[in-house]
Amino acid sequence: MKAYVKAKFPNITWAPIGYGQSVVATSLTQAEAMIHANPNLKAILPIDGAAVVGTAEAVSDLGDSGKISVFGIGDPQPNQQYFANGSLQALELWNEIGEGEMIDCVSALAVANKIKAGSTFSCAHGPSGSLVSGPAKWTVATSTSGVTGANKNTIIFSKPLEFTKANYKQYDF
């Protein structure tokens, strides 16, 4: 992540990384301390679902909704109040339906010996209304990428599901 951010956003200054220990109360306390210690803080990217809840609560409690952006990984349901009050901008999760469809496609190609490092392939997306998103073609990595972390023979699947203030009510999990 650091390599990607450094390449794409060279003027970013990093605050502490890795806080919260996956506990809401700890994340809340540590996020509040981070906000007080960094008055110019623009965004916090919590490490997991529990840290998102604690961080969004801290931003809300301190009256910093809209001033400090919170983005993370997690489910929309436990975060509904933070989307509603503007303390949380976005959550992302891997698309499990899409992953299953991709595994099915890659398995068929592997059995037919039609997929290897460096090859590019297509898979039909799921039925109409499927949650699958991503490119029309995928490429199997030929070497390790310092930006994505992908190793040789890795396929970067697709875009994750993104939950925002505009769509979080569509998901009940």
Image (tube, rainbow, N blue to C red):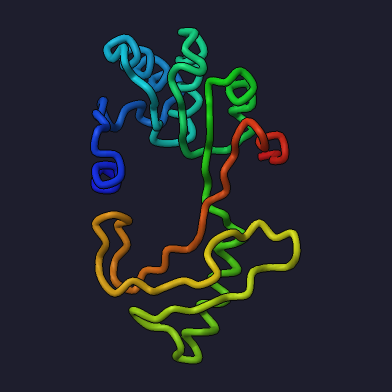
Residue 123 in picture, x, y percent from top left = 57, 75
Residue under the point 55% across and 63% down: 99
Q: Residue at x 37, y 22 (%)?
A: 42
Name the residue: 34% across, 18% down: 30
Picture quadrant of residue 100? bottom right
Query: In the depicted view, which residue is nearer to us: 108 or 165?
Result: 165
Looking at the picture, how far across and down is residue 158, in whole percent?
50, 60
Say which residue appears at 24% left-offset and 38% top-offset: 10
As drawn, 76 above or below 113: above
* Residue at the bottom extreme, as displayed: 112
Taking the image as shown, residue 62 lies to the left or right of residue 173, namely left
Query: Quick check: 103 above or below 68?
Result: below
Please name whichever residue, 90 or 29, is drawn nearer the observer in this view of the structure: 90
Query: Which residue in the rendered view is the most extreme toward the right?
Result: 128
Mark count: 0
Can you say whether 33 is above or below 8 in the image?
above
Work out which quarter of the rendered image holds the C terminus and state it. Answer: top right
Quadrant the N terminus occupies = top left
Side of 17 where 159 appears, left or right: right
Expressed as whole percent of the image width and height from the top left, the position of residue 166 reads: 66, 34
Residue 95 x/y as whole percent: 57, 54
